Image: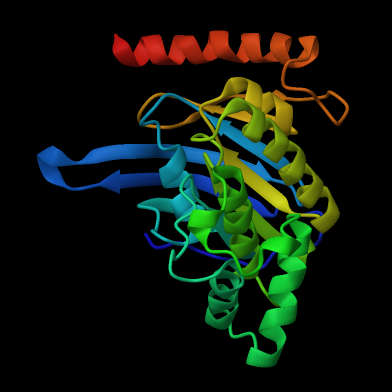
Amino acid sequence: MTQAVKAVPSRTAPAVRLTGVSKMFGSGGTALLALDQVDLDVSPGEFVCLLGASGCGKSTLLNLVAGLDGPSAGTIDLGGARVALMFQEPALFPWLTVTANLELALKMRGVPRQDRRDRAAELLDSVHLGGFARKRPHQLSGGMRQRVALARALALTAGADDHGTVLLMDEPFGALDAMTRDLLHDEIERIWRERGLTVLFVTHNVREAVRLGDRVVLLSSRPGRVVREFPVPMARPRRIDSPEVASLAASITDRLREEVGRHGA
């Protein structure tokens, strides 16, 4: 079955709705069921973090929501929202300046040439890199490159109301050191608030999920199914090393260990 996209009837409807979504790779005796009957709603403006053992289908789920692949069964309802996808690696073009990387994304979105420079400058300001427009990727730190990648992801939704944008993030901070990651947590939280984005964030770091998320969704070991959801009721801003974050993260880790153990058995 191909991906079905329907109109969302009201602003209170989910920004993302997965209904009975399954994904099978291959066929016959070599077939691999990656996702099995996943039901998940993400509200407009919500920050949802996905956790699960390696190979449970988290990245596959993001690819389906992004439209990079279609589900084998079930439907994905985005209500016409534009989707931005950010990977773990920045994947910037090394021969282009920061501005040129963003302008290329804007060109792909059909933004007129005369508007691209202003829009790129606005995006760089939004990630606090306004002074680095003429730099090339190799002249930036890892954290700065990820900020450019974030700006580029937002550039790909150019022309959309940011409040209708779904930002998909696939372990974007996994390769960064702890201090840089902590700073970028603050940045993504600020941008999420300012722009009213809906975020679906994949991570292996349980504390990161509690630090950032309104809700943490735990997937089972392969095939991936939603086995538990953990609301995060703590006030923002949060610190990743706070006792409240550590306590909830410990509870989620215990449940995650059960899933990893089940898969190992």
Residue 82 in view (yes/no): yes
Number of numbered discs visible in the structure rendering: 0
Which residue corresponds to the image point at 61% horizontal and 15% vertical from the top-left? 252
Residue 116 in the image: above or below residue 23: below
Is residue 206 left or right of 58 when viewed as pictured? right
Q: Residue 225: horizontal and vertical position, in percent? A: 46, 31
Residue at figure coordinates x 64%, y 69% from the top left: 155
Task: Tell me residue 38's x, y (percent).
Answer: 49, 39
Here the colouring is rainbow
Residue 172 x/y as whole percent: 54, 43
Please state if 221 lies on the left or on the right of 100 as rendered.
left
Frontmost residue, 48 versus 190: 190
Say which quadrant the C terminus sits in.
top left
Determine the residue positioned at 61% across, 58% down. 148
| Image quarter of residue 1 | bottom left
Furthest residue toward right: 235
**Where does residue 156 sit, x and y in percent of width and height?**
59, 69
Q: Nearer the viewer, residue 72 or 212?
A: 212
Q: Nearer the viewer, residue 203 or 98?
A: 98
Q: Residue at x 40, y 44 (%)?
A: 22
Whether residue 78 is visible here, answered yes or no, is: no
